[in-house]
Image (cartoon, grey):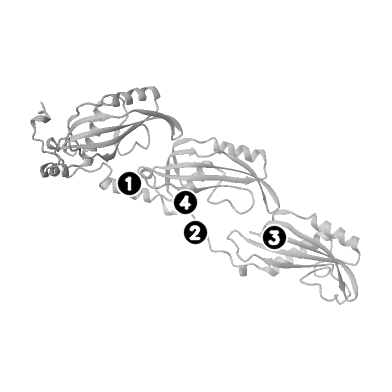
Amino acid sequence: MMPDIQDVFLPDSSSNAAAELRRSVSARAVQNAVRDYLAANWCGSSPVTCDELPVDGDGIAVVFHSEGPVKSDQSGDLLSFVFNVTGRGAARVNFRDCFTRLAAGCPEWGGKVTTQAGSEVWLHSLAAGSVSFEGREHQGVVKEFGSFTLTAEVAMSGSTFTPGECPEEEGAENAEKRLAYRAVDSGVVETALAAWFGGCTAGTLPEFGESVAVRVVSAEPFETAEHRDYTAKLEGRSVRGAAFLREMEERYNRLPVSGVTMALPGGSQVVFSALTADDNLEFGLETLLGCEFQTASFRFKVQIDPAESSFVPADYPAVIPPDRSAGRLNGVRLERALAGMIASQLRLKVDREVVRGGFGAPLPDATEPAVAAELTGLEAVNCPSGWKLTFTATLRDSDRTRLLDRLFLLESLLPRYEFMLDGFEVAALCKKSAALKSVSDRGRTLHQAQFQMELTIV
C-alpha cells in the first residue's frame, strides 16, 4: 500500500528544498504517466497516444499544454500540469459514452504510475474540465471529435524521473521518418495523381488547346512526420461540351478516398492516406486564341504516407528546357508556306500574284502582284510551348469589288486550329485585324486591305 502523501516531508513552497525538488521534473515523464493512467481507464479499443491523434483510424491523444504556477499556500512539492485530451471515433454513440466516462473519472487521486522508461510519477490529483463534442470530416468520413482539459498535480517528493525519458517520436525511428518526410517529391506526387485520375497530365495546363492537368498548388507546414499534406488542383478545358463536363464530374465524384497506392513506371510508389475534395467543382467559359472552351476545375486535399512511399529519380518530372530562341525558327520557310496557303485560298499564283515582303515594281511580264505577304511581328518572350507571330497580308486592286471578294474569301479561312503547314505544327491561326484604305501608286489610286493574322507555332 502506497504511503499517504502527508507521511512524506513536504517543504515550504518558497524554500530552496522545494525549488530543488521542482527542478528535477520531467514534463515528458508526466505526460507519459497521464497517458498510461488514461489508457488503463479507457473503455474503448482505440489507442491512447501522446502529442497527436493517429493519422489513420481513431484514438485518444494527450497533449501537454502548460505548467501551472506554484501557489504560495500549496505544498512546495506539488506541480500542476495542464493537458488537452482529444479523441476521435467513427462509432459516434460508443465514442461519446467512453470519452465522457474517461473525463467523469476525474477528479480523483491518481496514485503512482511507472512509465515505460522507468520514471515513477506520483499523480497527486487529476481534475477534468468540461467535455465538448463535434462532428468533423476525417479522410472523407464524418467522425465524432471530443476534447477536454485535464489538470494533473504531481507530488515531486514521491516521484523519480529517469534521465532517458524522451518522446516516443524521438530517436533513430523518428530520424528515419523525418528523412522519409523530406524525400516526398511533389512532382512525383503530381505524376501519381495524374495516373490515378486518368486522362490527364501532370503539371500546369498548357497555354492553348484541349487538355486536363493536375498540379500541386500548396504544401502544408510540418506537423508530424507521419504524413505530408498538400493541396492540389485538377483543371481542364475542352470544346467537347457535355461529354467533357461529365468526365470532370466523374473525376470529382471519385473523392473522398483513402488508402490508395500508385506504382509508377520508374519504380516509385506513392501511398495516399487520403484524397478529399477541398472545394466545389467549378464550371466556366474561356476564349483562347479566338476559340471558346468550356472549363472545369476543383481543389482537393492530398495526404501522403511518407514511410510507405518511395521516390525513384526515374519518375522525377522532366526538366523544362529554357525558352526557345527565335533563331531556331525558319522564318523564310514559314513565310513562304503562309504565302502559299493564301495563294491557294484566293486561287492566285505564288511568287507572281502573291509575293513575300512588299509589292515592289511589276514583274518583267507586267504582272502586278495582288497580295504581299510577310511576317511582321514576333513576341519578345517565347515560352517553351511555342512561338507567337504576327503575319500580315496586304491586298491591292483597282477594282474595289474584287478586292472585297478576296478579303472575305481570305477571312473565311480563319480561324484554324491544330494543323500542319509545310512541316510546322500550327496550334492556331486567327484573325487579328483588318483595315481598308486607298493608296496612290505610280499616279494611280488603288484600293488596299491590310489583313493581320496571329499565328501560334508549337
Percent coordinates x, y for residue 79 in the rendering: 19, 38
Task: Determine the secondary structure under disc 4.
Answer: helix
Query: Residue beneath label 3, please?
Result: 455
Query: Are there few (<14), some (14-19), or many (20+) residues within 10 Å of tag 3?
Result: many
- In the image, 14 versus 319, the foreground residue is 14
Q: Are marks 1 and 4 in contact (CB under 8 Å)?
A: no
For residue 431, side relative to residue 370 (left or right): left
Query: Residue beneath label 1, please?
Result: 177
Query: Residue beneath label 4, please?
Result: 187
Q: What residue is rendered at 74% in x and 68% in y?
A: 374
Percent coordinates x, y for residue 90 in the rendering: 40, 28
Identify the disc placed on residue 319: 2
Task: Determine the secondary structure under disc 1.
Answer: helix
For residue 74, side relative to residue 363 (left or right): left
Q: Amino acid at mark 4?
A: Gly
Task: Determine the secondary structure under disc 2.
Answer: loop
Q: Is residue 435 above or below residue 173?
A: below
Q: Earlier in the sequence, mark 3 or mark 4?
A: 4
Q: Residues under labels 1 and 3: Cα distance?
A: 52 Å
Q: Amino acid at mark 1?
A: Lys
Q: Are marks 3 and 4 in contact (CB under 8 Å)?
A: no
Q: Residues under labels 1 and 2: Cα distance?
A: 28 Å
The quarter of the picture where residue 365 lies is bottom right
Q: Amino acid at mark 3?
A: Leu
